[in-house]
Amino acid sequence: MAAKKEKIGRWWTTEPGDWEQEHHYYPRALNAQLHPLVTSFLSLDKLRIATRYCHLHPETDKEKLLQALSYVPKHFRWAGADLFCVTNEMAQRQMIVIETNSCP
């Protein structure tokens, strides 16, 4: 039997064991899986990621990149970002990061 949910203003509390993901996500999100290339990339350590990035972008300061990759946020730990492949008017392709999910 599920625990009784307490309403606080417009919000309901959710206790461990109360969460039913099918009530909160659409079916495609429930069944989503990371692409194998993304899984492989995310398994790399920070030094390997920085080395690969600096190989493609030699103008990058590797130490500053490692600092950025090692940063642990004090606030907004739930913040996230999306990565987009974009092309400018001169047909130059690049990946950009769009910050999302930082609402407190």
Image (spheres, grey):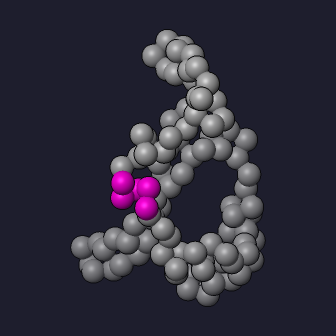
Residue in front for this viewpoint, 61 or 7: 7
Residue in front for this viewpoint, 27 or 58: 27
Which contiguous range is marked in magenta?
Answer: 27-31
Give the quarter of the figure containing the C terminus. Answer: top right
Magenta stretch secondary structure, dominant: helix
Q: Is residue 25 above or below residue 44?
A: above
Q: Residue at x 48, y 75 (%)?
A: 35
Q: Examine the rendering and report whether any part of residue 62 can be seen.
A: no
Q: Residue at x 55, y 38 (%)?
A: 19
Quarter of the view holding residue 70: bottom right
Indicate yes or no whether the magenta region holds residue 42: no
Q: Is residue 100 above or below residue 41?
A: above
Give the quarter of the figure containing the N terminus. Answer: top right
Q: Position of residue 9 (x, y in %)?
A: 49, 12
* Outermost residue to the bottom: 55
Q: Is residue 70 above or below residue 77?
A: below
Residue in front for this viewpoint, 56 or 27: 27
Indicate yes or no whether the magenta region holds residue 28: yes
14 sits left or right of 74 in the view: left
